[in-house]
Image (cartoon, rainbow, N blue to C red):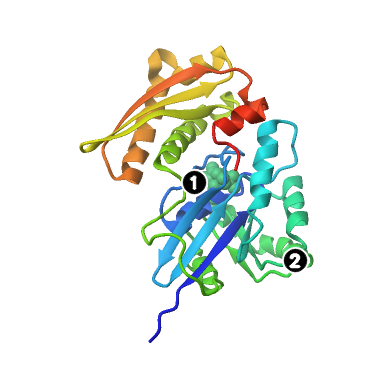
Amino acid sequence: MENSSKFGFVALIGRPNVGKSTLMNHLIGQKVSITSRRPQTTRNRVLGIDTQGEYQAVFVDTPGLHKEEKRAINRLMNRAAESALGDVELILLVVDATLWTDDDEMVFSKIENTKVPVVLVINKIDKLHDKATLLPLIERLSKRVSFKAIVPVSALRSTNLDDLKKLVFESLPEGPHCFSEDSITDRSSRFMAAELIREKLMRQMGDELPYSATVEIEEFKEEENLLRISAVILVERAGQKKMVIGAGGSRIKRIGTDARIDMEKLFDSKVFLNLFVKVKAGWADDERALKSLGYAD
Ligand code: GDP
Ligand code: MG
């Protein structure tokens, strides 16, 4: 029997914080896109690759589309999200079962006239007591877009993700795979290392830290049985530096330990991580500086 390969890109679209990155990670079974309860955790387009036999699906995780375009970093994130809409076989439109906002409305208006098939993914159903409360939402949205399917899921608990994955694989057209069988992302190990540190930073600092804080990798060296990584956390003000370091260095130590544990899992190697904090004022308002840090695709 002939074994013809299937390949395609699948975009994850939705406002910040609906769970797009969590969904991608749980669909492919690896953490390639960082997540936190803070909106705008994802800043760049990230690919998550899932290969199973003849099928290869490439999920495109995007920074959520949002209305606020005042700062340069927000404009760049919106552009990255919009460019993901071209050349995909399928759009997974992700919404939160428990919260509809103006930003959802804006995302909806952007995909209303697309020719690409759209699957409505209603996420966070683990937070619902009564599934029947979804019916008015489904009815309202179905009037505006003719969905290929509507799939309620819990990305966090992997509920219904098998059904969703089946649907995704079945919509892939014939074509050669673009990535090797064992690839999970298009991003470099350096980039992934920086992102894992940023995830711990966002998770442990909560609202104390402006989302403009970023991470630069200064050294990434493979030694015998060891990865040696030096990284700098860039913040905008001296007060923020103090907060990141924490009392007696306790917080930065925690951030470093948690990031290292994730890195060892991802890179399948022992990791030695050296972590610093530096103040670099005003960079989140400067598009050129952002591009030099890799925040523009
Ligand atoms: P994104 O901005 O759309 O990429 O959202 P994230 O994937 O970063 O998730 C935002 C927050 O929602 C995080 O705190 C996640 O843990 C949480 N979250 C994501 N999926 C679920 C889910 O299925 N159930 C619940 N209860 N929380 C979820
Ligand atoms: Mg995200």
Q: Mark 2: which amino acid?
A: Val
**Circle 1 is placed at which residue position?**
33
Residue at x 63% of width, y 27% of height: 284
The residue nearer to you, when weighing 254 against 135, is: 254
Query: Which residue lies at the image location 45% right of the left edge and 33% below the top edge?
Result: 200
Compared across the picture, whether 69 is left or right of 187 comes to: right
Q: Is mark 1 within 8 Å of ligand 2?
A: yes
Q: Position of residue 59 (x, y in %)?
A: 53, 57
Location of residue 132 by image quarter: bottom right
Classify mark 1: helix, strand or loop.
loop
- Please say whether residue 14 is visible from this viewpoint: no
Give the answer, above or below, for where 225 lies relative to 145. Answer: above
Which one is nearer the viewer's eye here, 176 or 240? Answer: 176
Q: Residues within 10 Å of mark 1 (few under 14, many from 20)?
A: many
Taking the image as shown, residue 30 lies to the left or right of residue 222, namely: right
Estimate how packed mark 2 is, as few (under 14), some (14 to 19) or many (20 or more) residues with alpha carbons within 10 Å. Answer: some
Q: Quadrant of the C terminus?
A: top right
- Would you say residue 68 is visible in this rendering? yes
Q: Is mark 2 within 8 Å of ligand 1?
A: no
Kindly identify which numbered label has been placed on residue 80. none
The residue at which mark 2 appears reads as 145
Residue type pointed to by label 1: Ser
- Which quadrant does the N terminus fall into? bottom left
When the figure is inspected, residue 297 is found, relative to residue 293, above or below; the finding is below
Residue 26 appears at what percent x and percent y?
46, 55
Whether residue 236 is situated above or below residue 38 in the rendered picture: above
Between tags 2 and 1, which lies in front?
1
Quick check: 116 above or below 101?
below
Mark 2 or mark 1, earlier in chain: 1
Q: Residue at x 78, y 55 (%)?
A: 109
